[in-house]
Image: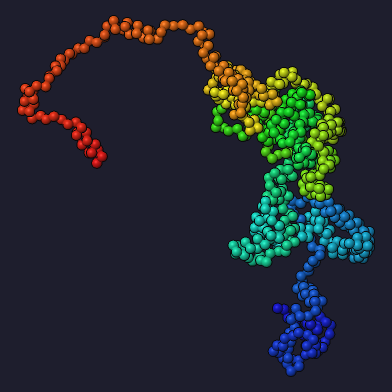
C-alpha cells in the first residue's frame, strides 16, 4: 500500500502541515502513527493513499508522473500501423476519418506557413478546429503527432487504431471459449446461459489448468462472443446439414435459355392446406396434388388430385400431360416411393446390388423418357416446390377450410370450429376448382423468374416448343401399362396383388408352354380383365385372362362352369399327341425284338487261363478227414459280434 506524509498531503490540499495534523487528531483524516522525531512530542504520521479523496489521488499520480518524466496520453495514442493494412481493408468510417485528418493537417501546415508566429498560429488553428468539429479534441501536440505519423508511416497512420491492435487481454480466453463452443455447437441448441454454466462446471471438475479464469466473464460477454461465431458454422452444427445447405451453402444457378419446352418435366406431390368435405358420414379430409411442371416454361402440364400420394396418381398425372402436350425427354423427381416404383422410374438406390433378377423395362423406358432423381433432402433443386408455394398463397388461402402450414398459421376461425365445420367445400367441387385454377390462372399468370421475362407459362411454352414427341392412343395405352415383378407361372397362372386382393390370370397357352418359368406381366389398373405376359428377355408370350374365385355359396351352375374351364387344359393335353399324328410300334415288342437279336450274336468272352472247380458233397469220409486235420466249423455271427465289441472299446 502506498502512503503519503503529512507534508505531501498538505501540498495536495494547499494547506499547512499543522492543519493536517489537527485533522488527524480530530479523526477527520485516517492516518497511522509512526516513530520519528519532530512535530508534537516527536509524533509522525503517514496517510494511506487509498483513504484520501479521489481528486487528490489523481492529482498525486499526475505529480508523480511529471516528476518521473513519464508522459502518457490515454485518449490520444499513436498506434503502429499493421504491415498489411491498405485502403481496401478500411471500413467506410475509417476512410472518411483518414480523409478528414489529411485535409486538416494539410490546411494546418498551409496556415502556419502564412502566419508570422508558429505558436500563435497553432493556437488560432486549434480554436478554429474546435469550433468546426465539436465532437473531436484538438491541441498543437495532437496535430504535431498526427503530422509526424503521416509523414513517417503514410496515410494509414491517420486511422484511429485504439483498441484495434488485438493485443488486449480477452475476456474469454480461447481455451475457455473452445469448451463453450463444444456445448453451444450442438443440435440440442442449448441456450448461451446453459452453455456458460456447463463450461464453468467442466472447468471446476476437470480442467485445473483453466481454473485461474474463474469466475467466467458475464453472460452478456458470452452472448456477444456467440454472435461472432460464423453463421455457416452455427447453421451446420445447431440446425443440421440440411439447414446449412438451404441457408448458407452456395447453390447452382441454372440457365433456362438453353432449354426448350418438353425437354424436362419435374414432378412432385403437394398437400393442400385445406380441409374439404369427404362426403356424408366421413370426417373432413386433406387431399394431395400430384403435378408435372415443364421446367422451361414453368407451366403445369399434368396433374391429378388424390386422397394419398401413390404411383397410380403419378401415372394418371403423367398420362394427362402426355395426352395433351406430348412426351417429354426427361422427368426429374425426388426419391419418393411413388416415383421410384419398380415399373415407373425403377427402384433407384433402393435396388439391391445382390440380386441378379431381371428388371423389366419401366414405363418411362417404354416411353423413351430419361429419368433422374434429386439429391436426398434437397428440395431447392426442384422448381416445382416454388410453384406449390404459389398454389398455397394464391389458392389454398381462399378457402374457409384453410389450415395453414403450421399451427401458428392456422386461422382463428378454424381453431374454434376444429375439423367439423359444416361449410367445407365438397371434395368433387374442390377438384373442379383445382382444374380451373391451374388452367385459367396459374398457367396464365405473368412470371418474373429466370428466362420468363414477365411472360405467362402458356406463352413461354408455346414460344419455346420446337419439337413434340407424340404417340397414338393405342400406342400410349400399351406404353403406359404397369409392370409386375418377375413371377413364376403356377398351376393357377400368374397372380396380381392389388389393394389386398389376389387376382389370378390364366390361359391354356400360358400353362401349356410356360408353367414353372419366370415371367412378368403388364396390366391396365382400370381394365383388369386381362394382362400381357412377357419372358425374361422382354418378349411377348401371350395374354392371360382373369379367373374369378368361387364363393363357398356358389351355385351349382357356377361350379360346373368353373370345372368346365378347368378341364380345358386337360382336353388340350389329351389332344397334344393326336394333333401331331405320332404313331410307333409297341414299346414291349420293340424291347423283346432287340433282346432276341442280341442273343444270336457272339458272346465276346475268350479267357487266357481256365481253372476247373469241382463241387464236393458232404460225406462221412470227408468229415473224418476234416476232423483229423483239426478243423472246426466257423461261427461267423459270433466273430462279427466280437469285432463290434472291440470296435466300441
User: Could you say which quadrant of the image residue 73 lies in?
Assistant: bottom right
Picture residue at 73% right of the left edge, 62% below the top: 219
User: In which quadrant is the N terminus drawn?
Assistant: bottom right
| 217 on left or right of 9 | left
**643 vs 471: above or below:** below
Q: Position of residue 638 (x, y in %)?
A: 19, 34
Picture residue at 60% right of the left edge, 64% below the top: 205
| 262 on left or right of 444 | left
Q: Nearer the viewer, residue 514 or 314?
A: 514
**111 vs 483: above or below:** below
User: Could you say which quadrant of the image residue 135 lies in?
Assistant: bottom right
Q: Nearer the viewer, residue 139 or 120?
A: 139
Can residue 79 be seen? no
Q: Position of residue 152 (x, y in %)?
A: 79, 56
Q: Nearer the viewer, residue 568 or 201?
A: 568
Picture residue at 85% right of the left edge, 55% below the top: 97
Q: Position of residue 446 (x, y in %)?
A: 86, 33
User: In which quadrant is the C terminus drawn?
Assistant: top left
| 114 on left or right of 95 | right
In the displayed image of the protein, which residue is found farthest to the front? 556
Q: Nearer the viewer, residue 439 or 21?
A: 439
Amino acid at each position: 500500500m502506498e502512503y503519503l506524509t503529512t507534508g505531501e498531503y498538505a501540498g495536495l490540499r494547499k494547506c499547512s502541515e499543522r492543519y493536517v495534523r489537527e485533522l488527524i487528531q480530530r479523526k477527520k483524516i485516517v492516518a497511522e502513527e509512526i516513530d520519528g522525531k519532530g512535530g508534537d512530542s516527536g509524533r509522525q504520521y503517514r496517510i494511506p493513499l487509498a483513504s484520501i479523496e479521489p481528486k487528490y489521488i489523481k492529482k498525486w499520480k499526475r505529480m508523480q508522473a511529471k516528476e518521473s518524466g513519464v508522459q502518457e496520453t490515454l485518449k490520444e495514442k499513436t498506434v503502429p500501423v499493421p504491415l498489411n493494412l491498405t485502403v481496401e481493408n478500411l471500413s467506410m468510417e475509417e476512410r472518411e476519418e483518414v480523409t478528414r485528418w489529411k485535409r486538416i493537417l494539410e490546411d494546418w501546415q498551409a496556415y502556419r506557413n502564412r502566419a508570422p508566429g508558429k505558436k500563435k498560429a497553432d493556437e488560432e488553428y486549434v480554436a478554429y478546429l474546435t469550433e468546426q468539429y465539436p465532437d473531436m479534441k484538438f491541441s498543437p501536440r495532437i496535430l504535431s503527432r498526427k503530422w509526424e505519423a503521416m509523414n513517417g508511416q503514410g496515410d494509414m497512420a491517420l486511422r484511429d487504431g485504439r483498441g484495434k491492435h488485438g493485443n488486449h487481454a480477452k475476456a474469454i480466453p480461447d481455451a475457455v471459449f473452445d469448451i463453450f463452443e463444444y456445448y453451444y455447437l450442438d443440435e440440442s441448441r442449448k441456450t448461451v446461459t446453459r452453455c456458460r454454466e456447463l463450461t464453468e462446471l467442466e472447468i471446476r471438475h476437470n480442467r485445473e489448468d483453466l481454473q485461474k479464469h474463474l469466475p467466467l466473464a458475464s453472460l452478456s460477454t458470452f452472448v456477444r462472443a456467440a454472435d461472432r461465431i460464423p453463421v455457416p458454422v452455427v447453421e451446420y452444427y445447431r440446425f443440421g446439414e440440411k439447414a446449412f445447405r438451404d441457408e448458407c451453402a452456395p447453390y447452382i444457378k441454372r440457365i433456362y435459355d438453353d432449354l426448350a419446352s418438353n425437354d424436362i418435366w419435374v414432378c412432385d406431390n403437394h398437400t393442400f392446406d385445406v380441409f374439404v368435405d369427404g362426403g356424408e358420414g366421413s370426417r373432413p379430409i386433406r387431399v394431395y396434388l400430384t403435378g408435372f411442371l415443364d421446367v422451361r416454361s414453368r407451366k403445369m402440364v399434368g396433374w391429378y388430385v388424390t386422397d394419398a400420394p401413390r404411383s397410380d396418381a403419378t401415372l394418371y398425372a403423367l398420362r394427362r400431360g402426355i395426352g395433351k402436350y406430348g412426351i417429354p425427354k426427361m422427368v426429374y423427381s425426388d426419391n419418393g416411393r411413388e416415383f421410384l416404383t419398380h415399373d415407373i422410374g425403377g427402384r433407384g438406390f433402393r435396388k439391391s446390388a445382390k440380386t441378379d433378377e431381371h428388371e423389366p423395362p419401366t414405363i418411362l423406358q417404354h416411353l423413351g423418357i430419361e429419368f433422374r432423381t434429386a439429391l436426398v433432402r434437397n428440395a431447392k433443386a426442384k422448381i416445382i416446390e416454388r410453384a406449390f408455394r404459389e398454389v398455397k398463397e394464391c389458392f389454398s388461402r381462399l378457402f374457409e377450410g384453410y389450415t395453414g402450414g403450421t399451427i401458428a398459421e392456422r386461422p382463428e376461425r378454424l381453431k374454434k370450429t376444429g375439423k367439423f365445420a359444416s361449410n367445407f367445400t365438397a371434395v368433387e367441387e374442390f377438384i373442379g376448382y383445382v382444374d380451373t385454377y391451374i388452367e385459367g390462372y396459374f398457367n396464365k399468370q405473368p412470371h418474373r423468374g429466370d428466362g420468363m421475362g414477365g411472360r405467362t407459362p402458356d406463352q413461354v411454352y408455346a414460344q419455346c416448343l420446337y419439337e413434340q414427341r407424340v404417340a397414338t392412343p393405342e400406342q400410349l395405352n400399351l406404353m403406359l401399362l404397369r409392370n409386375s415383378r418377375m413371377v413364376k407361372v403356377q398351376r393357377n397362372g400368374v397372380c396380381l396383388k392389388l389393394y389386398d386382393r389376389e387376382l389370378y390370370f390364366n390361359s391354356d397357352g400360358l400353362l401349356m408352354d410356360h408353367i414353372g418359368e419366370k415371367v412378368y406381366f403388364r396390366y391396365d389398373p382400370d381394365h383388369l380383365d386381362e394382362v400381357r405376359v412377357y419372358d425374361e428377355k422382354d418378349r411377348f408370350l401371350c395374354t392371360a385372362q382373369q379367373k374369378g374365385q368361387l364363393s363357398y355359396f356358389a351355385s351349382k351352375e357356377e361350379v360346373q362352369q368353373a370345372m368346365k374351364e378347368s378341364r380345358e387344359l386337360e382336353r388340350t393335353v389329351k389332344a397334344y399327341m393326336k394333333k401331331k399324328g405320332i404313331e410307333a410300334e409297341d414299346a414291349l415288342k420293340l424291347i423283346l425284338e432287340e433282346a432276341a437279336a442280341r442273343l444270336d450274336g457272339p458272346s465276346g468272352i475268350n479267357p487266357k487261363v481256365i481253372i476247373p472247380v469241382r463241387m464236393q458233397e458232404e460225406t462221412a469220409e470227408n468229415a473224418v478227414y476234416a476232423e483229423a486235420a483239426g478243423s472246426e466249423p466257423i461261427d461267423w455271427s459270433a466273430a462279427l459280434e466280437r469285432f463290434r465289441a472291440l470296435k466300441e472299446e
